[in-house]
Image (spheres, helix red, strand yellow):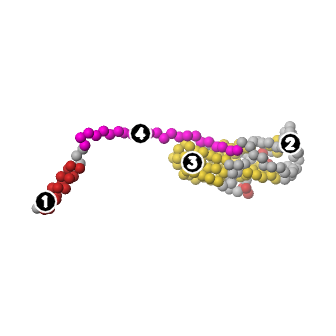
Amino acid sequence: MRFLKYVIGMAMALLVGSVAPAHAADTIVTFTITGGALTISAPASVNLGNTAAGATLQGTIGPVTVSDLRGTLLGTWTASVTSTDFTTGGGTANETIAKANAAYASGPATSTSGVGTFVPGQLTVLLAQPLSATVTAFTATALIGNNTVTWNPTLRVTIPNSAVVGTYTGTVTHSVA
């Protein structure tokens, strides 16, 4: 008898617990996550110092940062770098150092955030690539959500013996796509 009372009591508890409330209202909630931009930033200018004709000048450009706020799933991007020739005075042959005399090395990432695989184009200065053509600075793959990566590249310029005295100026351009 005791067992029967127990079973009846449990059945009533289940029945009472499963009865729908007298008044209920469901609300379907939606929202949208919007993506931002894929951008790259680099210092506006840098002075690598001075040296004599026939020497090699080397220095860091300063922090270059790619910010990917697109919120991708398994996204990718590639950062590239190009250069102009470096000229002084009137830009004659002896007042020009060809961009082929400049070599670029991204080096390792100095900071990263987000999920993804970030790979430098040239891990060390020994692997620097001439800027006579477009050089891959960094790549990112398997990106999930937003991410950033920063590196401090090195630029090495070999000065020809025929270069004349002067302050040489060129433009190193970083881009990302």
* Element carrying mark 2: helix
| Amino acid type, callout 3 | Asn
Q: Mark 3 highlights which residue?
A: 147
* Label 1, residues with CA under 10 Å away: few <14, some 14-19, many ≥20: few
Q: Which residues are magenta?
A: 21-43
| Residue 48 visible to the viewer | yes
Mark linked to residue 95:
2
The residue closer to the viewer here, 99 or 43, is: 43
Residue 30: image tag: 4
Q: CA distance from mark 1 to mark 3?
A: 64 Å
Q: CA distance from mark 3 to mark 4?
A: 25 Å
Q: Are marks 2 and 1 in contact (CB under 8 Å)?
A: no
Displayed quadrant of residue 127? bottom right
Q: State how many labels appear.
A: 4
Q: Position of residue 128 (x, y in %)?
A: 73, 53
Q: Three-letter amino acid code at disc 2?
A: Glu
Instruction: Look at the numbered discs 3 and 2 and tell me whether their residues touch, using CB distance below 8 Å.
Output: no
Q: From where the camera sits, is residue 74 visible?
A: no
Q: Residues within 10 Å of mark 4 (few under 14, many from 20)?
A: few
Crowding at mark 3 (Cα within 10 Å: few <14, some 14-19, many 20+): many
Which sits earlier in the primary sequence, circle 3 or circle 4?
4
To which residue does mark 1 refer?
4
Distance of mark 2 from mark 1, alpha carbons?
106 Å
Which is in the foreground here, disc 1 or disc 3? 1
Locate residue 107: give its quadrant: bottom right
Q: Earlier in the sequence, mark 4 or mark 2?
A: 4
Comes first in the chain, label 3 or label 2: 2
